[in-house]
Image (cartoon, rainbow, N blue to C red):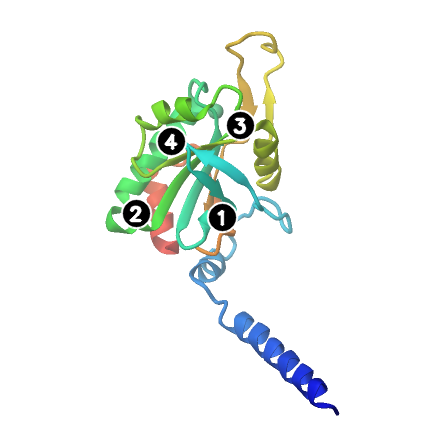
Amino acid sequence: MRRSDWLFVFVLAMTVAAVAGGLWFSDSESDRARRSLGGEPTVAEGVQIGGPFELIDQNGTAVTDKDLVGHWSLIYFGYTFCPDVCPITLTILTQTIEALGPLGDKVTPMFITVDPKRDTVDELHAYAEHFHPRMRFLTGTDEQVTQVTRAYKIFRAIREETPNDPDYFVDHTSLVYLVGPDGKYVTHFAHNTPAAEMAARLRRLL
Ligand code: NI
């Protein structure tokens, strides 16, 4: 073999070793959490939850899926005009983080709008005052929101009775997703899970 061929074999061997090593050491916190869930129901077996997105938060800071890496996230999709389910859920998330005490610092609560038309950065900035100070409120263009709702399998549709009403309602999936420090889906909670119960489940997973 020529010298360049040996170099190629060496690089290939190192690549294989690196990939194998990566797989071997990929037993991250969230992998352990996934295993510890055992028979916990997932959204649907084999359905991938999550994917790339580009949005902007209530302070005008760009946020992408890469910002999910390195900490736990509780992600909820909704809209600020929602009269009941959304504000109640965000209050539960706020109480959950508080109930976790110091452990709560590991978790970033996140709200992603399904109504970017009305939920501007300014609107989200004002809305954020009512909830946990570390909660991030994300919006974007309609295309960007479509992208993220598709990635997370979130249904959103303007309620049929109110299409021409400026005070329209939006029907939407109201699950709370737990995303691990690897940026991947771990499990989910029903929106009306009491804060104490959500905190108790999180304490076992984090
Ligand atoms: Ni809602």
Circle nearer the viewer, 3 or 1: 3
**Is residue 6 positioned above or below 43 on the image?**
below
Residue beneath label 1, please? 187
> Which residue does the image show at 53% across and 71% down from the upper left?
22
Question: Looking at mark 1, is its residue's CB closer than 8 Å to ligand 1?
Answer: no
Q: Nearer the viewer, residue 65 or 31?
A: 65
Q: Secondary structure at mark 4?
A: helix
Q: CA distance from mark 2 to mark 1?
A: 17 Å
The disc labelled 4 sits on which kind of residue?
Leu
The local crowd at label 3, few if under 14, some if 14 to 19, many if 20 or more residues have their Cα within 10 Å, is: many
The local crowd at label 1, few if under 14, some if 14 to 19, many if 20 or more residues have their Cα within 10 Å, is: some
Residue beneath label 2, please? 104
In the image, is 73 to the left or to the right of 49? left
Q: How many marks?
A: 4
Q: CA distance from mark 3 to mark 4?
A: 15 Å
Q: Secondary structure at mark 3?
A: loop
